[in-house]
Amino acid sequence: MGAPLFFTENRVESLRITLDRRLRLEFMPNIVSAKKRLRQNIATRERNRASRSFVRNRCKNVVKAVTAGSIDEAEKLFRDAVKALDQASSKRIVHRNAAARKKSRLSAMIRKLKENAK
C-alpha cells in the first residue's frame, strides 16, 4: 500500500483545505483524541477509496473482455476480479452481498458469452 501516512497538526490543517469540498470539514478538533480520530479517518478513507477503485477496475476489465468476445481473457480477468471482490468484502470495504451479486453477474456474462460462441 505504500508508506504509512503520518499527519502532524499542520498537515491535517493543510489537508482541511483540499478535503473541504469533499468532506465538508469546517473545523479542526481541539481535543487530542478527536484530532487522532480525524487523522485515522483520513487515512482509512484514502485506503478504502483505493481498494474500491481497484475492485471497480478489475470488474470493468472483465466487462471489456466480454464485450470484446475474448473468452479466455475474460475468464482470467474474472479470477482476478473475484479475488479482489473477496478481499474487499472480507475487509468490509464492499458489502458481502454486493460482492456476491457482482461475482454472479460477471459469471453470468461469461456464461452467456460461452453459450453464444457455440
Image: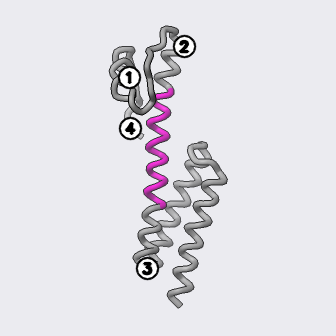
Residue holding disc 1: 16
- Element under label 3? loop
Q: Distance of mark 2 from mark 1, alpha carbons?
A: 17 Å
Structural distance between the alpha carbons of marks 4 and 2? 25 Å
Name the residue type under label 2. Answer: Ser
Residue closer to the observer: 40 or 22: 22
Q: Are marks 2 and 1 in contact (CB under 8 Å)?
A: no
| Mark 4, other Cα within 10 Å: few <14 / some 14–19 / many ≥20 | few
Q: Which residues are magenta?
A: 41-59
- Secondary structure found at label 2: helix
| Residue positioned 36% across, 24% down in the render | 15
Does residue 31 appear left or right of residue 70 in this picture? right
Mark with earlier residue (2, 1)? 1
Q: In the displayed structure, would residue 53 be above or below residue 30?
A: below
Q: Earlier in the sequence, mark 2 or mark 3?
A: 2
Q: Which of the two residues, 81 or 108, is positioned nearer the viewer here?
A: 108
* Labels 4, 2: front one: 2
